[in-house]
Amino acid sequence: MQPIYIVFGTESGNAQGLADRAKEALEKAGLACRVVDMLDVAQDGLTELETLLVITSTYGNGDPPSNAEAIHAFLMKKCGPRPNMRFSVCGLGDTTYERFAQCGKDFDRRLGELGATRLVDRQDCDVDYEVPFEAWLGKVVHALTALIGASTARPEGELAPHVVSQRADLPGTRRNPVSARVLENRNLNGPGSTKETRHFVLSTEGLPLAHELGDCIGLWPVNGPELVRAALDATGLGADAEVRYQDQVRPLAELLARRLDLQEPDVRLIDRVLGTTTAEARQAASRDHHVLDLLAASRGAWTADELLHHLRPLAPRLYSVASSPRVHPGEVHLLIDIVRYELGARPRMGVASRFIVDHAPAGSVVDVFVQPAPGFRLCDAARDIVMIGPGTGVAPFRGFLEERARTRGPGRSWLFYGARNRATDHVYEADLQRFLDAGVLTHLDVAFSRDQADKVYVQHRLAEHAEEVAAWIRGGATVYVCGDAKRMAPDVHAALASLLGAGKGGLESGAKELDALAAEGRYVRDVY
């Protein structure tokens, strides 16, 4: 009998981790299954699948993640009827985006239109996906064991609320982070810079934080006591009030500090305070208000349970590892952009930014975990690499170059890096110069967008070296892109398609060549 196929679409690795957990649960129930990256799903193979579980994130504001683009396009436009397929979809997303979990909705809708049978209704998950994911997975396991007739099938009504084993909760994982000591926390930007970028070093000595080049470190921020006090003052609630949250009873102040988002408002809070009724009004309110603004404007008494019901869960932040674990044993280096802006004529900071700047000095401890990124790995030292990483996107490439300096293979390295101003924002300049001087870095092309009247970005530097970059790629180089997903990644993708398509059919031809490179694992992106 054909195994159950679990396919995942992901940018940050969360959906892949959930796919592995689904496989574990199904195998525990006696069911044969396979986990497959959507990038590796052959289009003709999709039409032959009998049982399909789809776990996918959404990229940007409604698009499929990069590894899901090809199969999403095939399914939407070219796939024929699938009356013999059974399926279920779990979509990951963020309710602050208008097209919340849209990729999962697309897969669910289209498979239904093609005549496939839903095993279990689609599950849409917000940033805190653990509880809804496990609920969905429990239903899926029950439906499949009952349908396939496995010996472990449970009677109706006896769904296990938690179907994953303790392996998913090993120390150093998202659901079981560990406390790491901060060794260094310093601003890399010079005086007068319009940016603040922190070099953040953690001790991993004695901790289960084994990581590889290309991985991310997840950091759980904590809301400072001033924010917690503001929330309590606005609602008139006591810090010591005991509240049940996700099967645990904790003091309200602790939950507000460590478990709940006091910045990005949930739609339920927006509706209660502002009485909004349309998606457009909710989006505008989310852009214009923080949680504390809405709580201060709220009327009527709050109970602790009501407050928890109207707040979003606090989510971890992921940062690319900026060091080689073999060059820096017992340490992990991160490059963190500090987000500052104005809202309502008041200076504001990002949740993690405030925590890093105000509450995580050297000597303090922070809760962290490893987020593996098996799809973003440094290739063999014999192969050329082209790295494109403006801003904090340069982080993993510092680690790549440290590793290449250690192994010293014959492969060449070319880095395209960008920032605002050379004098103040050329982070890791000394490291990059050292790699150049040692011959580890063959070429370094930089784009400082605000050092001249017309802004210059990394895509412009790619265009300037179009023929040589194309020659590197066609000679076997692997292309890595890291950084901003909304503007940089599409612009770089277009620049690469243009230089590959020059004289060979234009952008469409170049885009197809990029698709082929991605399928080979030679066009790899870590965008956020």
Image: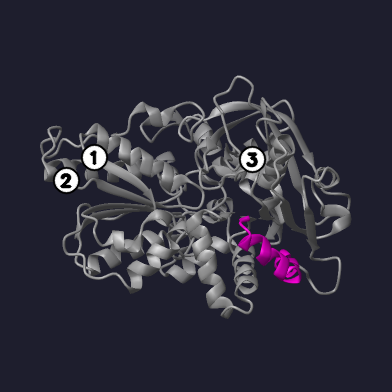
CA gap, disc 3 and disc 2: 42 Å
Find disc 1 in the rendering and name its residue.
32
Q: Position of residue 347 (x, y in %)?
A: 72, 55
Q: Are marks 1 and 2 in contact (CB under 8 Å)?
A: yes
Is most of the magenta stretch helix, strand or loop? helix
Label 1 – label 2 distance at C-alpha: 9 Å
The reply to whether residue 338 is in sight is no
Image point (33%, 62%), residue name = 107
Q: Amino acid at mark 3?
A: Val
Say which residue appears at 20% left-offset and 62% top-offset. Answer: 116
Q: Is residue 471 magenta?
A: yes
The residue labelled by disc 3 is 321
Q: Quadrant of the N terminus?
A: top left
Q: Residue furthest top?
A: 206
Q: Are marks 3 and 1 in contact (CB under 8 Å)?
A: no
Residue 81 percent across, percent down from the top left: 21, 69
Q: Specify whether 427 is left or right of 390.
A: right
Q: Which residues are magenta?
A: 457-479
Q: Residues within 10 Å of mark 3 (few under 14, many from 20)?
A: many
Secondary structure of the residue carrying tag 1 is loop
Q: Amino acid at mark 2?
A: Met
Question: From what the image shows, is residue 491 above or below residue 398?
Answer: below
Sequence-earlier tag: 3 or 2: 2
Residue beneath disc 2: 1
N-terminal of the pair, mark 1 or mark 2, is 2
